Structures are given as C-alpha cells and as structure tokens.
Image (cartoon, rainbow, N blue to C red):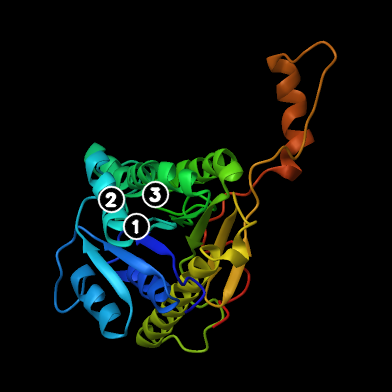
Amino acid sequence: MGLLGGRAAVVTGAGWGLGSQIAFSMAYQGARVVVNDSIPPENGKGAEYLVKEIKAKGGDAVLNTDVAASWEGSKHIIQAALDTFGRVDVLVNTADILNDQIIASISEEQWKTVLNAYLKSAFCCTRAAAPHMQKQKRGSLIHCISSAGLVGAIGKAHHGSATMAMVGFSRNVAIEMQRYAVTSNCIAHLTVPPLSCATSHDGEVQRKRRKQEDTITLSEVASLAVFLASDAASTISGQILGVRGKEIFLFSQPRIVRSIHHSQGWTVDGLTRMLEPAMKHYFTPLETSDSCFSWDPMV
C-alpha cells in the first residue's frame, strides 16, 4: 500500500529534476499522482515519459500540461486530480526556473519570469487546491524553495525575493489552514558547493563529485516530501526544512533577537551613537549559502 496509499497528489514542474523525483517517490509510496509540467518532453524525458514509467511499475498517474503560474491553468491542474482520482490530498509546488543575473544587470522580464515560476505558481495552485482540502479537512501543501532567500547568493536577487515571499506565504497558509488539518511547509534544496577540503584539484573530479552529491540531495528531498505528505507529519506545519546531501536542517524564522529603548525616544544622533554598538554582535553576517557551512556535505 505504501505510506501514501489512497492519497491523490499533484506535483507541479514534475517532468524534470526535483519535481520528477518527488512525483515518482510519491507514486512508489502508493499515491495517485497528477504529473504536471508544461515543458514538452525531450530525449525520452519529461512529464509524459514519467507517467509511463510510473504506470509501468504498477503506479497510478495522469499527465497534465497546464501552466502552473496561470490562474485558469492552476484550476485545471487541480481539477485533473478531482476528475481522475476524486480528491486532492497533496500539492507539491516545485515549478521553478534557473535564470541567474546580478541586480545591476537583471531585466524586468527576467525578474517577472522568476517570480512567476516560483511565487505565482505556488499561489495559484495552492489557491485552487485549498477549498477542496478545507472541505476534506485534510491536506498537505509542500513548497520547494531556493536557499538564495534564506541565506543569500550572488546573482539571485529575484530567486531570493521569491523564496522569502514563499516562506511568508507558506507560514500564513499554515496558520489559516490549521483548523482544517491542512499543513503547509517549505523545503529548501541546498546546492552543494565545491569541496572545501578537496585532495584533488582535478576539475573533472570536482564536477563528478558535485553531480553525485546533488543527486543524493534530490533523493533526500523527495523522501522528505513523502514524509511531510504522510500522516506521520500531520502535526508539522509552518516550518522551513533544508536538505544538503544526507543532512536535513530546520531553519530559524524571523524573530526579535535584540531591542534597545530610550525613555525620551530616539533621535538620529542617539541612533548614531548607540544602535550599532548595542546590536552589531547580533547582526546576521553577509554570507552566501555556499560559505555558511564549515563542513563538506555528508554523502
């Protein structure tokens, strides 16, 4: 039967990469899956081929090619689950796009493209699924995000903006849907940096090692998504989890860490004299997601 037996799951961006791995893992664990991706198949890969692979292994899946970042398209995606399986229990938002560009060079179109792929698709599909989960009094919403917003990276201001918006979105949805036993969580796929303690300077060795580590991370993310969609995680909601290699992290969320007060209120002069000395030890350093780890990935 599997951990997700009887559940109907929708996975957006499921034709390739992380989404494909999650959709396959959920089907393997007994879920009936709507495999969504608007990107056409190529070289034997893509959503259409994944559906065939799931069915060949005894699973149940249906193809959907609507655009997740579209208001009408998202409704069709969720309706595909309702029409085929009679319900929707799990929604995994993995739709994304790689489009790195530093802030001094990014175009308006690049900005819109990334925010649509990440944020609008998550909103539209969650909005389409929420009333049905609310009525069922059961559901799991899982949002796959970039580590760019959680820690920081070069060339990812648009990814970071979308990530932090999705974190806020997921948190508020979790609070609103708690009464209906619907959970909402984020999973960050933490990219693996070049080895910090490499014994070889061979670029090909580095490339193969990184590819292996990224593959392991994708597999671990898929396992975590299956867990979050199961009854075993029914009390986990509003959280941000991260995966790097065989490590899983729980991220902190913004909370007040230090305060200062003045009985007569603050002037610019008072702030100039007192704010930095009082708070600098609590400032978050300007580090990137690659440099915040002092150890190599566990693989």
Q: Position of residue 191 (x, y in %)?
A: 46, 67
Mark 3 vs 2: CB contact within 8 A: no
Mark 1: which amino acid?
Gly
Q: Look at the numbered disc 2 and give the secondary structure of its residue.
A: helix
Q: Which residue is mark 2?
A: 79
From the image, state whether disc 1 or disc 2 is nearer to you. 1
From the image, state whether disc 3 or disc 2 is nearer to you. 2
> Is 124 positioned to the left or the right of 220 in the image?
left
Circle 1 Cα neighbour tier, 10 Å, few/some/many (<14 / 14–19 / ≥20)? few
* Quadrant into which the C terminus falls: bottom right
Q: Which residue is mark 3?
A: 159
Q: Residue at x 74, y 15 (%)?
A: 266
Mark 3: which amino acid?
His
Mark 1 vs 3: CB contact within 8 A: no
Q: Is residue 56 visible?
A: yes
Q: Which residue is mark 1?
A: 86
Mark 2: which amino acid?
Gln
